[in-house]
Image (cartoon, helix red, strand yellow):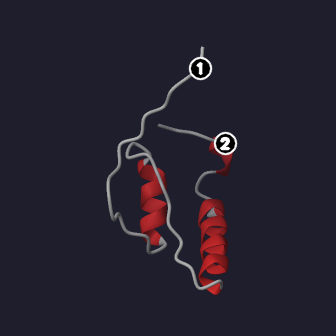
């Protein structure tokens, strides 16, 4: 599933943003974590390359108010 701006894919932008955010979080003495949909395999690959690991699978439900 392709999302976002296809012309921006593969340029390392997500990696730079996630790395910068994780570094700021670590500088505060906290641990960074992410939630990602299992179907978003591109994001999962990116996050794993950055050192994140899957710790737990969760089921999310979305609801719409009519």
Q: Which residue is drawn at 52% across and 76% down?
A: 31
Residue 44: image location, x then y, percent: 43, 57
Q: Nearer the viewer, residue 9 or 43?
A: 43
Give the quarter of the image for residue 5. Answer: top right
Q: Residue 65 carries which label?
A: 1
Residue at 32% x, 59% y: name it: 56
At which x and y percent is residue 49? Answer: 45, 70
Give the class, few, some or many, for how many residues have Cα within 10 Å of label 1's Cα (few <14, many ≥20). Answer: few
Against 62, residue 8 (above or below) is below
Q: Which residue is drawn at 67% across and 45% down?
A: 7
Q: Is residue 16 above or below residue 59?
A: below
Residue farthest to the front, as pictured: 65
Q: Name the residue under label 2.
A: 5
Camera-nearest residue between 57 and 44: 57
Q: Rounded to the nearest whole Å, what is the CA distance between mark 1 and mark 2?
A: 28 Å
Q: What kind of element bears circle 1?
A: loop
Name which quarter of the figure residue 11 lies in: bottom right
Task: Sort mark 2 into few (<14), some (14-19) or many (20+) by Cα contacts within 10 Å.
Answer: few
Q: Provide residue 22's location: percent of width, then percent of height.
A: 60, 74
Is 61 on the left or on the right of 65, as rendered?
left
Question: 39 left or right of 25?
Answer: left
**Which quadrant does the C terminus fall into?**
top right
Q: Quadrant of residue 4?
A: top right
The image shows residue 29 at horizontal and vertical percentages of 59, 85
Q: Residue at x 56, y 22 (%)?
A: 64
The first of marks 1 and 2 along the sequence is 2
Asked if disc 1 and disc 2 are in contact, CB closer than 8 Å, the reply is no
């Amino acid at each position: 599933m392709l999302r976002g701006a296809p012309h921006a894919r593969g340029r390392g932008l997500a990696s730079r943003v996630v790395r910068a955010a994780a570094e700021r979080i670590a500088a505060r003495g906290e641990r960074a974590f992410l939630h990602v949909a299992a179907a978003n395999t591109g994001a999962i690959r990116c996050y794993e390359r950055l050192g994140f690991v899957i710790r737990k699978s969760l089921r999310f439900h979305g609801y719409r108010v009519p």
